[in-house]
Image: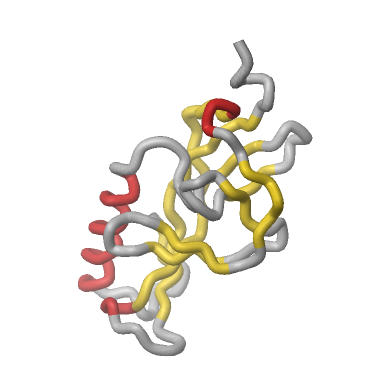
Amino acid sequence: MIASNNDALDPEDMALLRQRENARNARKGPRSGDYVIMPDGATRRFCSDGLSLGSVTGGRYHLDRDGRVQYSGGLDHHHIRQNDLRDTGRTKLGSFWFFHRDKMQARNDITVQLDCRVFEFSPESGKT
């Protein structure tokens, strides 16, 4: 994990982050915020556990207490079936945010980089 705006990060935030990161890492399979390599080689991020893809131009990923991630941003029209994915075993850093000291107010976000799983999308992989 890497904090992007360290000036606001304190021991309480670090404890909140560890809790969130551990809960996220306990979730199996592709998760919101994880990466997928498309057949054309482009890398995208999932914007839901339902395997929808976020906009190419970005979006923001809020890390909840229970390890779930809420995406805010534009959506792509792709929806990927889980059996068309292969876990590469690699990880890549991805940006997430949560509220400093869990206080919901404007301009009170902490941005961090966490390891995300990397999957490869192959529409053929689900066929037998």
The residue sitting at the bottom extreme is 106
Q: Which residue is rendered at x = 47% and y = 45% of the image?
A: 116
List the single residue furthest toward the right. 40
Q: Give the x, y percent position of residue 20.
A: 29, 58
Q: Nearer the viewer, residue 49 or 67?
A: 49
Colour convention of the picture: secondary structure
- Residue in the picture at 44% in, 47% down: 115
In the figure, is residue 14 to the left or right of 56? left
Query: Is 9 situated left or right of 47 in this image?
Result: left
Q: Which residue is outermost to the top?
A: 128
Q: Residue at x 37, y 56 (%)?
A: 68
In the rendered view, tell whether residue 12 sits above or below residue 86: below
What percent of the width, then of the height, locates residue 4?
47, 68
Towards the viewer: 37 or 90: 37
How many callouts does the rendering have? Answer: 0
The residue drawn where x is 59% and y is 49% is: 52
Q: Is residue 65 above or below residue 86?
A: below
Residue 30: image x %, image y %?
A: 47, 40
Does residue 72 appear left or right of residue 17 in this picture?
A: right
- Pick the residue in front: 43 or 81: 81
Q: Quadrant of the C terminus?
A: top right
Quarter that holds the N terminus: bottom left
Q: Is residue 34 placed above or below 10 in the rendered structure?
A: above
